[in-house]
Image (spheres, coloured by chain):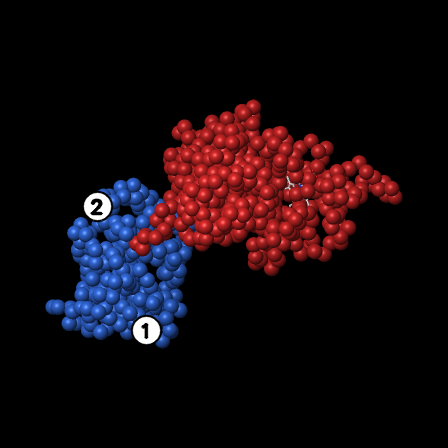
Amino acid sequence: MKKDNNDKNNLMLNKKLSRRDMLRLAGVGGVGLLLGGGAIGSLLASDKKTTSNASTILSQDQDSIPFYGAHQAGIITPSQNFICFAAFDVITDNVSDIRKMFQKWTTASATMVSGSLIGNVNDNPNLPPSDTGEAAELSPSRCTITFGAGPSLFDARFGLQNKRPPSFQELPPFKADSLEPEWCGGDLCVQVCADDLQVAFHAIRNLARIARGTAVLRWTQEGFQRSTQADPKATTPRNLLGFKDGTANPNVTDSKLMNEVVWSQSVDGTAWMTGGSYMAVRRVRMRIEVWDRSTLKDQEDTFGRHRHSGAPLGSKDEFDSIKLDALDATTGKPVIPSNSHVALAHGDGSIQMLRRSYSYSSGLDLKTGQLDAGLLFISFQRDLQKQFIPIQQRLANNDKLNEYAVHKGSAVFACFPGTTEGGFIGETLFGGI
Amino acid sequence: MNLRYVVPASLLISSILFTGCAKNNAESALNTSNTSEAVATNATNTDPSTSTSSPDLQTAIDQYRTYVIEQCDLFVKETEKFTTAVKAGNLDEAKALYAPTRMYYERIEPIAEALGDLDPNIDARDGDVDPSEWRGFHHIEKSLWEVGTTKGEEAVADQLLKDAQLLRAKVETVDINASMLVTGAVELLNEVSSSKVTGEEERYSHTDLYDFAANVEGAAKIYELLKPELEKKDADLEKDIGERFASLLKELEPFKVNDGYISYEKLQEDQIRKLSQTLDALAEPLSNMGTILGV
Ligand code: HEM
């Protein structure tokens, strides 16, 4: 199956190969710049080793991530520099309109992540161009586009009630919530990540355009991380509170672990979600100004990790394991405070999730004159009830971080399994209707 | 009466050249029946679609011309009633006539906008033009609603009627072509999205929904006229546009009262957003009507 996918990817590449790709590939293979048509095929054949399907891990220098594959890209594929996240509401009454939109979305997405212009009306003077054009001649920038459905899609409007996965519902209220409706919910979501913000924005914009008449934007949030340029070694990125964020994430190259933690399985009982994953999104505003006047000790006690190294308190190395039972020799108290973020999030270590968050900065809170900045927390898991919810409950009740962070937005989405060329994202749900 | 002799050709040419820099599509496709050969040829060269209207499109163009003139006639007639009320000091009557009168203008706004200074003279809002040059509907609107009087607006009223009559005269000379129809329909909806749906058009009277409805009606008229051609070229697109006009009209329906519309101030935020998004949903396929023009 893997081989099959590779061939498909090559076929896709072959079709969409832009001039720029040719130069790049030629450079990689050390082939001369002047290639005849026949040479492209052999060039791609020699490139086969570096082409992989969306569900496997790509080396950092690969600029394009295949859209098609068993799983959607943008979940266990490496994080990019930027995110443009959008929640949509469906405005049609007709489920076949949704299906058509996903068909169009799929074709457009596969094209965009390959770095090509969408549609075929891009030079008729009498018509608006089918691609909005701002990403023309830009590299694919590891762009990934990931689609999901919110619980509200399964209400009475479309007759999809009995398709809702049993454990997939809106999140319950949590203790420290301060949610604002304009940052919550959505019938559908599109997560676009790319190493270039313009490339990412271009994708959201064109998908919103294609959706017009069928779905409308409900809320959007852009986010960023330190760039690969600023951190060529790609060490764990730091969030806006200055701490390394993502250290204890499960190993995405361990496919057995991914099947346990991230991917919905057929035994989970919802056939259309097999190979998909459930996403939790929380727009967490940081009380930046308050944090900035807290002491280093206070900051480290908040997370239970050292700021500089990222190591658990009392340890040296970022990746040292967390020992929650270690006691301080003089005070007799736990070295890692029991109300610290890591202590509560880790618990007994039996529950895991894959976090794929981005920082956000959205200007000022006009009321207070303070920064509206924080974390667009995103996690993927096989089951929200068993993973996200219990951990978030522990955090909401006791996390010392709640002094410095407040949850303003929230949504959950069932992210579809991947598809192959000719199929479309969402086909397992909308296909038979 | 032959109107070609009423408006000097030089005036028309210069107005076209001037508007050319501020606006784009409709104007570039616009030329008038009494412009010099040079200007006409120029326009044809820069826009390949202007000279190639098929016989079927010609019917639509002729029907549209009739529509524009009809609307213009009614506009002059109603403006006369409105300005008479202003001058007679009938505040309530003037207020009642204000929004319905403007609808005739709003239905054909892109045509008026293509005619030089007429649009600012008739329709400029406070701040759109130099204060010393500000006149027209919104000047009177401000006095009627904000100050609560017709006093002091007599001269503005006289001038408005003259401007309306001049529009009627100039409209006669506009050479409408297919590309102008297509861009005009989109422009009407763009008008709605940029000022009417935001409540910025009618700051004092809050009668924005009248303008909204009139702009949409103007665009719908063009669609209706182009429909037969569109059906031949792209039946799916034609159907799509038809359905989306229907849903926009459905969205407007609850805001109708008697012969008019409720005040913009009574709209809830979510209702405004819905109107705006429904409008965008229509404008997207509508902007592809140019497909009937060929490449
Ligand atoms: C502003 C909000 C948040 C910030 C700044 C934040 C930051 C951090 C940091 C710095 C770490 C330690 C390094 C690491 O392992 O990545 C961490 C760990 C973790 N966080 Fe958060 N986090 C936030 C919200 C959340 C939320 C809402 C959840 C889930 C409900 C969560 C779940 C976790 C988990 C599961 C770990 C790993 C614990 C372990 O096993 O060691 N975090 N977070």
User: Badge 2 local density, few (<14 within 10 Å), some, or many (20+)?
Assistant: some
The colour applied to the residues of chain A in this rendering is red
Disc 1 within 8 angstroms of ligand 1 (CB): no
On the image, the x and y values in percent for residue A377 come to 60, 44
Chain bearing tag 1 is: B
Given residues A30 and A387, the one toward you in this image is: A30
Residue named by callout 1: B152
Q: Please name the amino acid that badge 2 sits on.
A: Pro
Q: In the visual, does A339 lie left or right of B175? A: right
* Residue under the image location 44 percent in, 35 percent down: A421
**Residue at the extreme bottom of the image, as rendered:** B132
* Residue under the image location 76 percent in, 52 percent down: A296
Q: Image quadrant of residue A75?
A: top right
Identify the disc placed on residue B228: 2
Q: Earlier in the sequence, mark 2 or mark 1?
A: 1
On the image, the x and y values in percent for residue A356 come to 60, 42
On the image, the x and y values in percent for residue A416 come to 50, 34
Q: Kindly indicate whether the residue at mark 1 contacts the one at mark 2 (C-beta within 8 angstroms).
A: no
* Residue under the image location 72 percent in, 46 percent down: A310
Q: In the visual, does A244 lie left or right of B125? A: right
Q: Is residue A384 above or below residue B83?
A: above
